[in-house]
Image: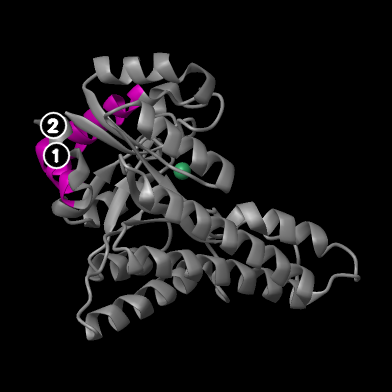
Amino acid sequence: MIIDTHCHYNSEPLLSEIETHWKNSLSHGVVGGICIGTDINNSNIALQLAQKFSNMFATIAIHPEEYTEQINSILVGDSFTEETVQNILNTHTKEFEGLLNFALAQDNKKIVGIGEIGLDYYRLKVKGIKRNLVEHAQKQIFQNQLELAFQHTLPVILHVRDQADRTESNAYYDTFNIVSKITSQYQKEQRPIPAIILHCASGPKDYIQNFIDLGAYIGFAGNVTYANAPELRQIFEMTPKEKILLETDAPYLAPNEKKGQVCEPYFITETAKFLQDKFQINLDIILANTLKVFPEFQKVVQ
Ligand SMILES: [Zn+2]
């Protein structure tokens, strides 16, 4: 039995064929899935799909690239004002809080986390003061969603990406600093700490180790099977067995034999088989990890 902890059923090309994809997944031994939000609109769709399919749950989020693009576009030229950036942030924050309250108040509550949220400097085009502004904006909206996740003890699904060789203001370390700060604050106050998941893990080893030391879960997608991804397999090997989660990130990252194709959710079985063959991983442990983070699936596997 496999649970896909990260899939974009709420986006095309999966959304319009959702019935077929979901049926296909179920017939391949996938017993449940989490539909991941990246903006207000598709987070809303994720919640609707979770209402429709009993074994499907949802997360909601504003992804770092979502607002970065908007902010980047107003920073072109010299006529931007910090106020305009702040207005975008305020709007996003208000919309997100509204959606979260709506999700939490649903009779058949299906929200199981907040994500994918985080920092992504990978494609940042602006430089200098504008760049600082975009980074600041990313941090602000990330922190805001992170705080809400902690307040409601909802698992946090992190998206973090940067250029491998960036030394200053690196998204990986910036994310870790922000998460570790709120974690220690909650520890000090003896408040419950939600599960932290590094979705589709990548990045420097010491950053991954920092998150493992913090107790985070590490999500592995189809790219762990790629011939040119030995560093992802090293991350897999350094992750304690009880912290491993499986995901497709479909429609992205189809596993090696289907690389380049639209990733269909049932392809997760290929990733699982690869990890079984190469690392003798026991899928029961991964299922147990999944149930620990998302106990809502307990009734699905019974
Ligand atoms: Zn994703």
Expressed as whole percent of the image width and height from the top left, the position of residue 153 reads 29, 63
Expressed as whole percent of the image width and height from the top left, the position of residue 31 reads 22, 27
Of 237 and 189, the residue lying toward us: 189
Of 247 and 47, the residue lying toward us: 47
The Cα–Cα distance between marks 1 and 2, rounded to whole angstroms, is 6 Å
Expressed as whole percent of the image width and height from the top left, the position of residue 162 reads 55, 60
Query: In this view, which residue lies farthest toward the bottom?
Result: 188
Point out the image quarter for the C terminus. Answer: top left
Query: Is 95 on the left or on the right of 106, as rendered?
Result: right
Q: Residues within 10 Å of mark 2 (few under 14, many from 20)?
A: few
Q: Residues within 10 Å of mark 1 (few under 14, many from 20)?
A: few
Determine which residue is flagged by label 2: 301
Q: Is residue 175 above or below residue 270?
A: below
Q: Residue at x 40, y 54 (%)?
A: 114
Residue 231 appearing in the image: no
Determine which residue is flagged by label 1: 298
Residue type, numbered disc 1: Gln
Q: Residue at x 50, y 35 (%)?
A: 45
Q: Quadrant of residue 282?
A: top left
> Marks 1 and 2: CB-CB under 8 Å?
yes
Of 281 and 8, the residue lying toward us: 8
Point out the image quarter for the N terminus. Answer: top left
Q: Quadrant of residue 109?
A: top left
The overriding secondary structure of the stretch rendered in magenta is helix
Q: Residue at x 30, y 54 (%)?
A: 235
Q: Is mark 2 within 8 Å of ligand 1?
A: no
Please tell me whether mark 2 sits on a helix, a strand or a loop: helix
Query: Is 243 on the left or on the right of 130, as rendered?
Result: left
Q: Is residue 261 above or below residue 201?
A: above
Q: Magenta stretch?
A: 266-292
Query: Is 50 on the left or on the right of 79, as rendered?
Result: left
